[in-house]
Image (cartoon, helix red, strand yellow):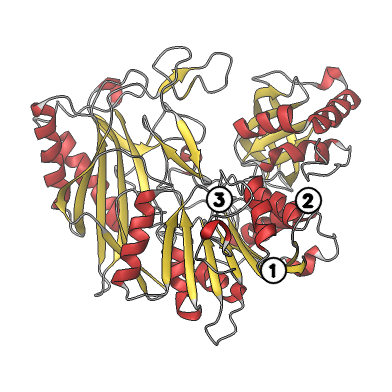
Amino acid sequence: RARGQGMGAYRLGALHALRAPLLAVSARHTRRYMTRRMPGTAASATAASSAAGQSEVPKSGDVLTLECTSLAFGGRGVCKLPGGFVVFCDRAVPGETLEARVTSLKGGGRFAEATKVSSISPCEHRTAAPCPHFERCGGCTWQDIAYAHQLTMKRDQVVDVMTRVAKVDQTRVQTIVGDCVPSDKTERYRNKMEFAFGPGANGRGVVIGLRPSGNHSDLVEIGNPDGCLLQHPVADEVLRGCRAHLDSDGNSLLDAFNRRTGEGVLRSLTVRVAVDENGEAIAAVDIAAATRGDDEDAALRGLAEAIAKVRGVAAVLRTKKTPKPELRLAEGRRQGWVKGGRGGRGGSGGKESRRGGRVRKSGGGDADGEGWSGEDVEVLSGAATLPMKLRGVTFALSAPSFFQTNTDQAEKLVAAVEDACGFSGDGTEVVLDLFCGVGTLGLCVAKKAKHVFGWEVVPEAVKDAERNAEANGITNATFRRGDLAKLKASLPGVGGKGGGDIPKPDIVIADPARAGMDESLVKVLRSVGAERIVYVSCNPATQARDLLRLKGGDGGEGARYDVRYCTPVDMFPHTPHVETVVVLDRISI
């Protein structure tokens, strides 16, 4: 079954057998992938564990001395006990000897997960982390690693999945995968950050901060006095202004929203910063809150007025949240409280539904702008949109609009996509832009194309894309709504099929969410048979799976494609995440 899905047969050594399930970043996906999708791999892991010996299996809470030998996809260190038992450890770096505390056994005791306690012998690339929140926050897991080596590790992870999953020859892959494009900024590079509200010491007052990785209940306070080194200084000032207002007298009505019970008002604060025509920073602030009655509503508006007075703030909005629980108690899990629930055991709140590869959430999600929440957004001060400029195109972003969070690096990403399209220069190419969102990629390359046809499932995104095209005087771009996860034999309207008016595309640009392409879409793309596909991804693992399918590695009818080259782009310094731009050319029909 694994071979049929294009994942291939893995070597039986403990390290390689256990790295396969980690194609998904989160531990939740790791467990599900291993037990449901990779039964052969699980069997291999069992054999490796048996070889290690049952006496070597650690217990939860044990503190072990480990040596990190490599990285699993997603950035966790792969460590082994002397007998071969494998431990995946957060923030462990290859070449490092460390002490780690076992947090759980997985796969029926076949491997363990751990968190680093201390470094005994750091790796040669270790450096001092500049952020005072580094040890607790967990957002910048690689901040204590020299940036040049971060780029090397990111490229290595791309090479790994291209070899093992996409089945690119081990010799050829080194020429196909280029160097990781570095970010000019490794600090203050994010244009958007979302912060949570929480109760202060002894349950009194309200604090603002970030959730530690994998923890939905704790909070690392940010902005008092130290801000976040990822965001613009204006955003730090917003946090301080918000905290100062909440600490003043007469604001007892504005307590923190309790995700377990649904009680409280203030849930989150999102700050997005752009640069205006004069080079000045301007910010839009979105307060997510659940008010009950006029008194709480008036208190919230008072907070909005205080934030609006912070220098650089151009708009303050309010996202209305439903006052109901968002977490449920999950027994037997390292994380006691998990998303989705009604405050007790089980429950069905916080439902997620996948549409076209992007996640739409209702009932209170933590989406970082991916898709639309469908909740009511009210403008309390200023304009409803924030202008963001990219490659000469100005995008008007509403509060929930998805946009690349590293603006400067997005310039390089779009430039890489434009180069990857290989435009002839005579303006004759028809481009199909799939998962187009607000038109970011399609509108930026429209000047070199005959026509761009964008495809997106979210209706609000389609409307924003149309408005962005009109505002920029771009007349050769058309946007349509369609669910790319629910296709059958064809893409409606493309190549004259289904009475459509979209000619056969010369170039397809696809930029799906982390889940990658639905298998039905891959079949449709092979049926359409464009000369070139430019595949942009924030998850090289699912991208590699789709590349194998587009190559025809899993059989099927239609055009077959060959991977020409892959450009990794570092959109998120100090994290294991990497964006990739892959070029595929048609080799047969």
Horizontal and vertical percent position of residue 188: 40, 59
Tell me which amino acid carries mark 2: Gly
Residue sitting at x 18%, y 41%: 244
Residue sitting at x 65%, y 61%: 528
Q: In front here: 268 or 485? A: 485
Q: Quadrant of residue 111?
A: top right
Q: Residues within 10 Å of mark 1 (few under 14, many from 20)?
A: some
Tell me which amino acid carries mark 1: Gly
Callout in the foreground (2, 1):
2
The residue that mark 3 highlights is 575
Asked which secondary structure carries label 3, the reply is: loop
Q: In front here: 33 or 426? A: 426
Residue 570 lies, with reference to residue 378, above or below; the image says below
Asked which secondary structure carries label 1, the reply is: loop
Whole-number angstrom distance, CA of label 3 to CA of label 1 = 19 Å
Which label's residue is closer to the chain start, 2 or 3? 2
Callout in the foreground (2, 3):
2
Q: Residues within 10 Å of mark 3 (few under 14, many from 20)?
A: some
The residue that mark 1 highlights is 178
Tell me which amino acid carries mark 3: Thr
Residue 360 lies, with reference to residue 83, above or below; the image says below
Any part of residue 33 in sight: yes
Any part of residue 405 in sight: no
Horizontal and vertical percent position of residue 278: 24, 75
Residue sitting at x 50%, y 19%: 336
Label placed on residue 556: 2
Q: Is the residue under label 1 in contact with that under label 2 (CB below 8 Å)?
A: no
